[in-house]
Image (tube, rainbow, N blue to C red):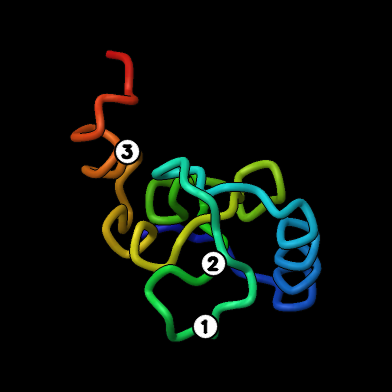
């Protein structure tokens, strides 16, 4: 388990900064509808590219936009199964 502590003020600032980029989901590559309610599976969430559980840092450089369902599928893995199945991952 990671020993990183989350700073909620910084988390909110990073979330706003990432939202303002209107980036596509870094996991599946598809566009994100930033107007969807947070309960929608395709809504915007921030993903830790290297999960905190894998000792990834809680910094802006390790955060990216994702769909809620893509992030849920990825969980604490470095690579989401959806990316592997899509063939977009080069091994």
Left or right of 39? Residue 6 is right
- Residue 15 higher or lower than 58, as above or below: below
Which tag, 1 or 2, sits closer to the chain's start?
1
Helix, strand or loop for disc 1: loop
- The circle on residue 38 is 1
- What residue sits right under mark 3 in the picture? 79
Residue visible at 54% across and 67% down? 45
Helix, strand or loop for disc 2: strand
Q: Residues within 10 Å of mark 3 (few under 14, many from 20)?
A: some
Q: Residue 83 at x, y = what percent?
A: 30, 37
User: Mark 3 to mark 1: distance in Å?
Assistant: 23 Å
User: Mark 1 to mark 2: distance in Å?
Assistant: 8 Å
Nearer to us in this view, 2 or 32: 32
**Quadrant of the rendering where the N terminus is positioned:** bottom left
Which quadrant of the view contains residue 46?
bottom right
- What residue sits right under mark 2 in the picture? 45
Q: Residue 33 at x, y = what percent?
A: 57, 66
- Residue 41 higher or lower than 33, as above or below: below
Nearer to us in this view, 63 or 59: 63
Q: Is the Cβ of the residue at disc 2 closer than 8 Å to that at disc 3?
A: no
| Count of residue discs | 3
Which tag, 2 or 3, sits closer to the chain's start?
2
Which tag, 3 or 1, sits closer to the chain's start?
1
Left or right of 12? Residue 45 is left
Residue visible at 78% across and 67% down? 16
Q: Nearer the viewer, mark 3 or mark 1?
A: 1
């Amino acid at each position: 388990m990671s020993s990183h502590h989350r700073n909620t003020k910084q988390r909110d600032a990073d979330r706003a900064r990432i939202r303002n980029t209107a980036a596509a989901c870094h996991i599946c590559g598809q566009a994100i509808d930033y107007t969807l309610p947070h309960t929608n599976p395709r809504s915007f969430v921030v993903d830790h590219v290297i999960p905190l559980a894998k000792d990834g840092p809680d910094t802006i450089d390790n955060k990216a936009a994702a769909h809620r369902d893509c992030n849920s599928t990825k969980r604490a893995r470095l690579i989401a199964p959806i990316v592997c199945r899509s063939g977009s991952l080069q091994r």
